[in-house]
Image: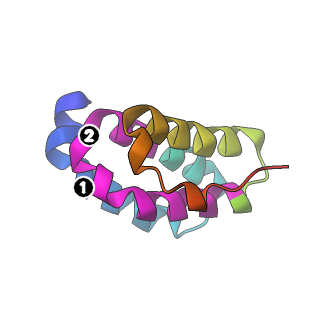
Amino acid sequence: MPSAAGIYGIDMLDTCFKVIDYMDEYVNRNMAFCIGLIIENGKEKIFPHYKTIMEKLRSIYDSATLVDTRDNAIAAIGRMVYTNPSGVPLEMVKIIS
């Protein structure tokens, strides 16, 4: 995955974003996980897309009814923080109650 994310990360993200719009929770659970891997392995090439990624992860999280789906969305945000702490748009991170 590391070499593929570096080369095709943006294309992979675009595909994930299109699939997320179908609003199928079982698919979106996997898309959140996939986005997390792309973030972790794509690094600098993915940094400019953090705002859009946060919007998509928020969409997944807000529409989720399964704990696993929410967990994968939060884990992807965690990978954003781990990979590029200063690049995470903190104003988009909402405290979850």
- At x 41%, y 67%, the residue is 18
User: What residue did someone put label 2 on?
Assistant: 42
- Local SS, label 2: helix
- At x 85%, y 49%, the residue is 97
| Range covered by the magenta-colored residues | 34-61
Q: Earlier in the sequence, mark 2 or mark 1?
A: 1
Residue 38 belongs to magenta span: yes
Majority secondary structure of magenta residues: helix
- Local SS, label 1: helix
Neighbours of disc 2 within 10 Å: few (<14), some (14-19), many (20+): many
Percent position of residue 69, x then y: 67, 45
> For the view shown, which residue lies furthest in the front direction?
86
- Residue type at mark 1: give it: Ile
Q: Is residue 40 visible?
A: yes
- At x 61%, y 64%, the residue is 59
Q: Out of 26 and 17, give the one closest to the viewer.
A: 17
- Residue type at mark 2: give it: Gly
User: What residue did someone put label 1 on?
Assistant: 10
In this image, 84 relative to 93: left or right?
A: left
Would you place residue 68 above or below residue 87 in this image?
Answer: above
Rendering quarter of residue 41: top left
Percent position of residue 35, x then y: 43, 46
In this image, 65 relative to 20: left or right?
A: right
Per the model, the C-alpha gap separating discs 2 and 1 is 9 Å
